[in-house]
Amino acid sequence: MNKGNFLQFCYLLSLFFLGACNSAPKTTIDESPLKEPLHVDTPTLVSEEKLIVPCVLDTVLEFNVAQLTLKPTDSIYIEEYFLKNKQIDSVTKLYDNCEVTALAIEKLVSKRIPGFLRRENKPEKLFLKLKTEQWHLMTTDPNLDDAGHEFEHYFKEFGYYSIRTQCYEGNFYKIVNDSSGDVTKLFGRPYFSSNGNYMISVSEDLIAGYCRNGFQLFKNENGNLVMIGKFEPTLWGPQSVRWISENKFIMKCARLKNPNTFESLNFYTEVTIKE
């Protein structure tokens, strides 16, 4: 690639990134304009080597109540909390359907907490047991195009159930308060910090476009989840999270190999929260 073509490519890449915050939503989830970044600071792409780890990682997101600093970091192993990675892989290989896979995972993880959930009449009817001893039915919402629910994890120490929600195309997550039954809709899988002060929800969908692509960060205020902000990039997306301190986490992410291909590559970014 000659110098002129490379500079043109960098310019186009910058335009793609700057459009990330304004990308059209793909599912109807609670939106608040005050929770979009107030300011995004991204250094200029200066060399071809920077394409290996996108410059969008060297980013500061300014929200109303907090600042998030994203920077490149070394790869680390992230073991999922709801089931061992090897078990997840073995179940995934058995089925060619995401919903069926999620139901199979539900059967495995629900054995750890007998008596806290049940299926009734039909498989799509999922009930969760609240602290009041009442059973909470997970209902579908036609406005969200959700078709069913699959239990994934019980954050008993923080008082929340994590539920995967299947749509006719794509999926998202819901997190349910085990005291009130109140439901918070999420982009994707939730990850709580060690002490439960924060929770981040992540989802990556760069190719199909059926799910949200990005993350939401919440503050856990005495059992009430308040969203600090959300970010939806277009050139990369977060897949999983590992908290390394109460205000710092590492995300495993994927990016397109280049804007004209469906191939993706993994990389890691460290995020620091400053309130």
Image (cartoon, rainbow, N blue to C red):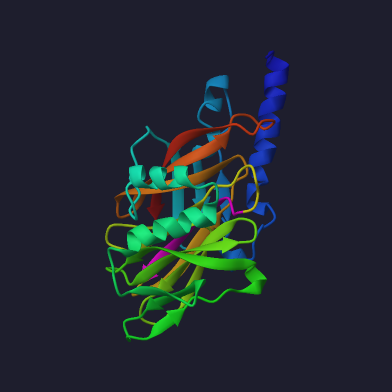
Which residue is depicted at the point 69% across and 30% down? 260
Give, as a single range, the part of the protein colored magenta: 211-220
Which residue is depicted at the point 49% across and 71% down? 184
Residue found farthest to the top: 2
Where, quadrant-wise, is the N terminus in this rendering? Answer: top right
189 and 62: which is toward the camera = 189
Q: Is residue 144 magenta?
A: no
- Compared across the picture, whether 42 is left or right of 189 comes to right
74 and 56: which is toward the camera = 74
- Compared across the picture, whether 61 is left or right of 12 comes to left
**Image height check: is 118 above or below 251?**
below
Which residue is depicted at the point 43% across and 37% down? 268
The image quadrant that residue 25 belongs to is bottom right
106 and 73: which is toward the camera = 106
What x and y, as percent, mark residue 39? 57, 52
Where, quadrant-wise, is the C terminus in this rendering? Answer: bottom left
What x and y, as percent, mark residue 244? 30, 47
The image quadrant that residue 106 belongs to is bottom left
Q: Is residue 215 magenta?
A: yes
**Image height check: is 27 above or below 127?**
above
**Image height check: is 165 above or below 138?**
above
Query: Mostly what secondary structure, the magenta segment?
Result: strand
What x and y, as percent, mark residue 216? 50, 58
